[in-house]
Amino acid sequence: MNHDQAKAFVRQAVQRVVPDADFTGLDPGVSLRDTFELDSLDFLEFVEALAELSGTELTEDDYPVLDTWDGCAARLVAEASTSTQGRSG
Amino acid sequence: MAEFTMPSLGADMDEGTLSQWLVHPGDRVARGDVIAVVETAKSAIEVECFENGTVDTLLVDEGTTVPVGTPLARIGTTAESEPTADRPPSTPLVRRLAQDRHVDLAAVHGSGPGGRITRADVEHAEPESARAPEHDTTVGPSEPTHTGIRRQPATKPARRKRSRSGAEAQSAPTARPPRPVRSDDSTGERQAPQRVRSSPLARRLATELGVDIAEVTGTGQGGTVRAKDVRSAAAAEGAAQTAVPNVAQAATARLMSRSKREIPHFYLSTTVDMAAALKWMHARNRELPLSARLVPAALLFKAVALAARKVPELNGHWVDDGFVPAEDVRLGVAVSLRGGGLAAPALAHADALSVAEMMAALKDLVARTRGGRLRASETADPSLTVTNLGDQGVEAVFGVIYPPQVALVGLGRIVERPVAVNGLLGVRPVVTATLSADHRAADGATGARLLTTMDKLLQQPEEL
């Protein structure tokens, strides 16, 4: 998974919670929760969707980095590269 | 013969629009079955029946707005119609299956325990050849195959589809795409006529907003155009440059004005140490699958519900110059509607739910409130309401009581603060819990008891 693929997963996950969420021109460094007015239940639903779409296991400890588009993508990419290395080694 | 009347679905409701019938004359209904959908100023609400019996007459057409208390249907109660005991035992699911397959249950041999008719029995039974018309609305008491069980898959909003009302769609960067017309033909319930079906509220709004109702995609039964469709359309077209009259907001405004006019509010506040509760929650969450993970609100709400049970003086209603304690804790949950306005549906027996159940109930309730599909039993008479503004980033909220309730608990954001514990300074997560209470019903000492009880409960989260 590269960064762009990961970002696509994030967009899809947000759109499951807020179907009309518009990512056009969105600064990848701003808070998704603030931008799309996600409350704690919405956020949980988003994390659920993101885990499912990307096949990544996300724990509560990950929540802080999952706040921004870039942060989410970096987290997914990191997980993917770790598991790839694990398999090759 | 019992009358099914337009229910009052909240203290602020004077009238409602019967937007959809889910039963026909002749259908058997049981207490608790959802038999109609009523559109109020705030949302569409599924209304349950309070009788066991057979629908005799539908007195009000779909799309008609009537005052609260107006008879909507006559229901022949069980005693007057066929005794239940004579019917072959079956379940609502089986009765529905039988109806779909045109199987006369009276002719089916039940192979389940006690002669109960099972799904397999129906699946193997021969369809009733005589039943040519798809929907015989003159079903007599000898045909126990019709029931009024929630037959509305086509109109139920998808779990994850959030409906947004006009005001927000208007401010959103892109307009919401028009919803597809849902075809109800698959349910075979009713034929949609060719003309545009719409509710009176929708027509009035369309006139006010300058929207051509024929152009609006209806999301109601058979494509019926409802008020929210008109608002969405108006917002999408950008037709309304001025403020869209938001009906939900107006209803909230009326109720809140009444509260401040009539209720002598007083306010208490306390800081609750959340370290123990959050530690317990994080430990639980590590073991739970994502879908079952908890959020702090579930613990906080549970603590409020238990505190309400322990301080019954604040759990109930102010009726005719006196306080009437509620029999159980129906915890109202203030949910902000995305288009503005508030709804406060109730969680029944909130004090008896486990934290996990509370979490599940909360997710479900919030999703359905925002999706505009609540049941009548969920909107009626919360005994105490809780509002959680933590997600909006503020530390404390001093709320306005929902009449005729006498108290409202407000929860702010959980923040890390330096706290002195046993003479030592530490950084701990804390939340500000407030109470707004009706001074006619309670005094400061009673109010304080509720907040301190809640605090104590949160220090022992495993007991919640």
Image (cartoon, coloured by chain):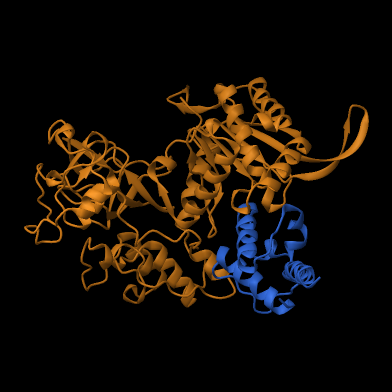
Residue B148 seen in this snapshot: no
- In the rendered image of the structure, the colour used to display chain A is blue
Image coordinates for residue B124, horizontal then vertical, percent:
20, 54
Q: Residue at x 10, y 61 (%)?
A: B133
User: Who is closer to the viewer here, A13 or B397?
Assistant: A13
Q: Is residue B77 above or below residue B443?
A: below
Which residue is situated farthest in the right direction here? B424
Image coordinates for residue B69, horizontal then vertical, percent:
28, 40
Is the C terminus of chain B in the top left, top right, bottom left or bottom right quadrant? top right
The mark tally for this picture is 0
User: Who is closer to the viewer here, B382 or B456?
Assistant: B456
Residue B139 seen in this snapshot: yes
Image coordinates for residue B65, horizontal then vertical, percent:
29, 53
User: Who is closer to the viewer here, B281 or A67?
Assistant: B281
Which residue is situated farthest in the left direction here? B130
Q: Is residue B65 above or below residue B6?
A: below
Give the left or right position of residue B49, taking residue B334 as reference: left
Q: Residue B200 falls in which quadrant of the image?
A: bottom left
Q: Is residue B81 above or below residue B192?
A: above
Give the left or right position of residue B331, taking residue A27 as reference: left
Give the left or right position of residue B110, taking residue B422 as reference: left
Q: Residue B75 falls in which quadrant of the image?
A: top left
Is the N terminus of chain B in the top left, top right, bottom left or bottom right quadrant? top left
Q: Residue at x 50, y 48 (%)?
A: B365
Q: Residue at x 78, y 69 (%)?
A: A78
Q: Residue at x 51, y 69 (%)?
A: B242
Give the chain letter for orange: B
